[in-house]
């Protein structure tokens, strides 16, 4: 490379600040791109498709290429012979890291929809490799991080629902993620144990926050009023509340 490029002017225009180190900017063609300021430079990610804009094997990603291979094998009755060689697993591992770098920043920017998309995409890699890698060490390589990625995926999905005021749906997403992590097969791996406990703790805390902020339904409000009426020995009021609660519960059943 004969051309010499000094990046100092570009770096000075965006001083490093760990609190504000990610931004969305328009590309030359107007498409939004993600830029990340590091202490020594600037990283740039495509917001859609593969983060580095590459198209391995002529596809959007190596995952899509190998997934198509699997579907073709299934269609021809050759799934039993399908497998991922160590080199192919390495390709998927390296590509998954690019998506990890991007979804961490997307989460930081509260781009919940793209965070859900990228974490779900990497979970597909986990499942594909765990099921079809020819070497056992490759099958198990990603599993230590499964609790973490389940947590990030569920947290972003829950935040999407909270933005729409869907508290019950958000709470259900978080509780299902907790159950999913609790149901994972135990691994004799320090990283897995750490990520499992950290993820469960984070999701339980999020569930508590959602529960605390969730507006009470009419039935829940009446039940709370009933408890207060009983505590104050307001028995006539309590009887009226019980009648109303009974009607609402019957309506739910119907």
Image: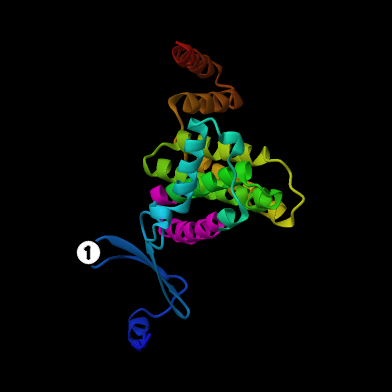
Percent of width and height locating residue 208: 56, 43
Query: From the viewer's perspective, is residue 17 above or below residue 142?
Result: below
Percent of width and height locating residue 107: 45, 56
In the depicted view, which residue is nearer to us: 152 or 63?
A: 63
Percent of width and height locating residue 197: 68, 50
Q: Tell me the magenta residue range.
A: 91-115
Can residue 155 be seen from the camera position used here? no
Quadrant (top left/top right/bottom left/bottom right) for the C terminus: top left
Q: Does residue 98 show up magenta in the picture?
A: yes
What residue do we see at 57% from left, 35% from top? Answer: 79
- Picture quadrant where residue 29 is located: bottom left
What residue do we see at 47% from left, 28% from top? Answer: 221
Percent of width and height locating residue 85: 60, 51
In the depicted view, which residue is nearer to us: 71 or 138?
A: 71
What residue do we see at 51% from left, 36% from top? Answer: 73
Query: From the viewer's perspective, is residue 185 above or below residue 85?
Result: above
Give the number of callouts. 1
Quadrant (top left/top right/bottom left/bottom right) for the N terminus: bottom left
Query: From the viewer's perspective, is residue 220 above or below residue 238?
Result: below
Disc 1, SS: loop
Q: Main secondary structure of the magenta part?
A: helix
Q: Residue furthest right?
A: 188
Badge 1: residue crowd in 10 Å (few <14, some 14–19, many ≥20): few
* Colour pattern: rainbow
Query: From the viewer's perspective, is residue 133 above or below residue 29?
Result: above
In this picture, residue 37 sits left or right of residue 97: left
In this picture, residue 4 sits left or right of residue 191: left
Q: Which residue is mark 1?
A: 29
Q: Does residue 135 show up magenta in the picture?
A: no
Can residue 225 be seen from the camera position used here? yes
């Amino acid at each position: 490379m004969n051309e010499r490029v000094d990046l100092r002017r570009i770096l000075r225009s965006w001083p490093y600040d760990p609190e504000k180190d990610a931004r969305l900017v328009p590309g030359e063609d107007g498409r939004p791109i993600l830029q990340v300021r590091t202490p020594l430079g600037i990283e740039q990610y495509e917001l859609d498709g593969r983060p580095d804009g590459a198209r391995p094997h002529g596809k959007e990603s190596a995952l899509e290429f190998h997934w198509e291979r699997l579907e073709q094998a299934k269609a021809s009755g050759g799934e039993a012979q399908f497998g991922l060689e160590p080199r192919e697993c390495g390709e998927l591992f390296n590509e998954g890291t690019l998506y990890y770098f991007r979804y961490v920043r997307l989460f930081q920017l509260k781009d919940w929809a793209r965070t859900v998309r990228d974490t779900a995409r990497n979970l597909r890699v986990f499942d594909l490799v765990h099921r079809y890698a020819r070497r056992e060490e490759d099958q198990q390589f990603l599993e230590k991080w499964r609790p973490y990625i389940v947590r990030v995926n569920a947290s972003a999905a829950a935040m999407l629902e909270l933005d729409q005021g869907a508290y019950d749906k958000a709470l259900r997403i978080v509780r299902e993620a907790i159950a999913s992590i609790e149901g994972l097969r135990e691994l004799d791996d320090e990283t897995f144990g750490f990520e499992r406990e950290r993820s469960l703790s984070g999701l339980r805390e999020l569930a508590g926050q959602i529960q605390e902020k969730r507006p009470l339904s009419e039935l829940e409000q009446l039940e709370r009023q009933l408890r207060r009426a009983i505590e104050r020995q307001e028995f006539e009021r309590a009887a009226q509340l019980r009648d109303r609660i009974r009607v609402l519960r019957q309506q739910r059943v119907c």
